[in-house]
Image (cartoon, helix red, strand yellow):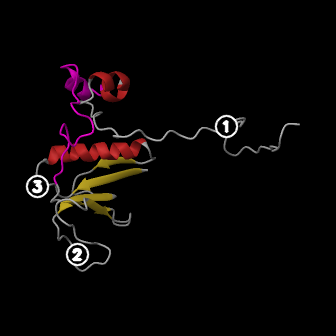
């Protein structure tokens, strides 16, 4: 599932357009890592599956709408989104949005170990030599923003269970029961 998104408006405090894009890219990458979806930003003039914007307390039709409520200012509600038919994602512009090495970040002091990392990143080494780059160039490759908590490991299969890979369209017969 290849989804596109465009950013209609940016936050007016603390972070600029590039930091906003960096934060959204990191968030979408987290979704891509655990789902079949991929995300790509498109220009504002192009059609997209998702539209993202940072809005004030009273925005669009929130005063009259039962399902689209207004924001509450600083703290409280950070964002809301709508069903896929419209694909709108609204962020509260009164919040203090921060990306990077601050006390609110997940990884403090995420820095490159080598001075040549930005150059290697531009050459595509972040994807082709991911293990090396994650260790030595995490900042340039955008590996700094990871989940602040460990993800749940998959449940192992029950003991004495046999698993077989069966190609699609192939008929198999099996018998369930205990060994005698």
The label on residue 104 is none
Q: Tell which tag, 3 or 1, sits nearer the viewer.
A: 3
Q: Which residue is mark 2?
A: 61
Q: Which residue is mark 1?
A: 165
- As helix, strand or loop, the secondary structure at mark 3 comes to loop
Q: Is 144 placed above or below 34 here?
A: above
Which element carries disc 1, helix, strand or loop?
loop
First-in-chain label (1 vs 2): 2
Residue 45: % across, % down: 22, 57
Q: Is residue 155 above or below residue 138?
A: below
- The range drawn in magenta is 96-125
Q: Residue at x 24, y 45 (%)?
A: 23
> Which of the two residues, 176 or 128, is positioned nearer the viewer here?
176
x 71%, y 37%: residue: 161
Q: Quadrant of the C terminus?
A: top right
Location of residue 136 in the rendering, given as x and y in whole percent from the top left corner: 28, 21
Mark 1 vs mark 2, CA separation in Å? 52 Å
Does residue 47 appear in the picture of this structure?
A: no
| Residue marked by disc 3 | 12
Image-based side of 178 in relation to 92, left or right: right
Label 1 Cα neighbours within 10 Å, binned few <14 / some 14-19 / many ≥20: few
| Residue 176 among magenta residues | no
In the rendered view, does 118 fall on the left or right side of 155? left
| Residue 42 seen from this side | yes
Q: Quadrant of residue 63?
A: bottom left
N-terminal of the pair, mark 3 or mark 1, is 3
Residue most toward the bottom? 64
- Residue drawn at the location 23% of the way across and 74% of the way down: 62
Q: Residues within 10 Å of mark 2 (few under 14, many from 20)?
A: few
């Amino acid at each position: 599932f290849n989804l596109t998104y465009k950013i209609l408006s940016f936050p007016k405090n603390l972070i600029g357009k590039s930091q906003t894009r960096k934060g959204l890219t990191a968030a979408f990458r987290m979704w891509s890592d655990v789902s079949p979806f991929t995300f790509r930003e498109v220009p504002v003039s192009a059609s997209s599956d998702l539209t993202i914007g940072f809005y004030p307390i009273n925005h669009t039709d929130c005063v009259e709408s039962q399902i689209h409520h207004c924001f509450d200012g600083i703290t409280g509600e950070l964002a809301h989104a709508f069903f896929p038919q419209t694909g709108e994602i609204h962020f509260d512009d009164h919040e203090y949005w921060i990306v990077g090495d601050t006390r609110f970040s997940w990884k403090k002091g995420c820095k490159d170990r080598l001075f040549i990392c930005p150059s290697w990143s531009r050459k595509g080494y972040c994807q082709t030599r991911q293990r090396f780059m994650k260790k030595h160039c995490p900042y340039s490759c955008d590996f700094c923003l990871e989940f602040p908590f460990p993800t749940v490991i998959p449940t192992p299969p029950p003991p004495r269970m046999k698993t077989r890979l069966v190609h699609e369209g192939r008929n198999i017969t099996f018998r369930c029961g205990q060994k005698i």
